[in-house]
Amino acid sequence: MAMDNKDVVRAFYDAAINRKDYSAAAGLVGPRYTQHNPRIADGLAGLEEFVTGLRRDFPALRADVRRLVAEGDLVVGHVHGVRVPGQPGTAIVDIFRLEGGRIVEHWDVMQPIPGEARNANGMF
């Protein structure tokens, strides 16, 4: 049974971010991978460099996927990323475009979670 687009993205978060397993993550990416995060290079080589850097620099980093929303070929993830356990972390919104069940494009916006907020609603 083929995975739907949200399943592919959820598996990608697990492989690339939580397990830092480049080979598993690469299997979820299309032959052409366009990256819009200016700190990450395009293509599989850029993905490999990114995952390798996470494994080296932030081995305990975790991405907690709070929600995924899909429309057509796009999946949007609302994610709580924590590089070091005990830190407040970062609120992340990722946008993935898929073709043929593979991720082919990625955008993201990240905001550090402050220690204090002017409301009690939280970022998730």
Image (cartoon, grey):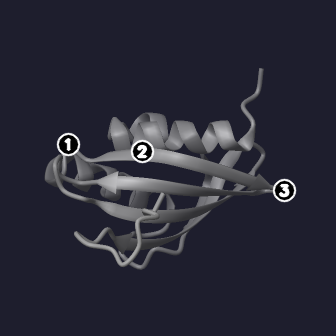
Q: How far apart are labels 3 and 2 at the CA level?
A: 24 Å
Horizontal side of 66 relative to 102 (left or right) equals: left
Q: How far apart are labels 2 and 1 at the CA level?
A: 13 Å
Please name the residue shown 72% across and 31% down the image. 3
Q: Report x, y in % for residue 100.
A: 78, 45
Answer with the quarter of the image where residue 114 lies.
bottom left
Horizontal side of 84 relative to 26 (left or right) equals: left
**Is residue 34 among the parts visible in the rendering?**
yes
Determine which of the numbered discs, if any, sits on residue 60 in the image. 1
Q: How far apart are labels 1 and 3 at the CA level?
A: 33 Å
Determine which of the numbered discs, if any, sits on residue 64 in the image. 2
Determine which of the numbered discs, if any, sits on residue 72 in the image. 3
Q: How crowded is mark 1: few (under 14 residues within 10 Å), some or many (20 or more)?
A: some
Please name the residue shown 75% across and 53% down the image. 70
Pointers 3 and 2 in contact (C-beta within 8 Å): no
Q: Residues within 10 Å of mark 3 (few under 14, many from 20)?
A: few
**As shown in the figure, which amino acid type bears the numbered disc 3?**
Gly
Please name the residue shown 26% across and 72% down the image. 116
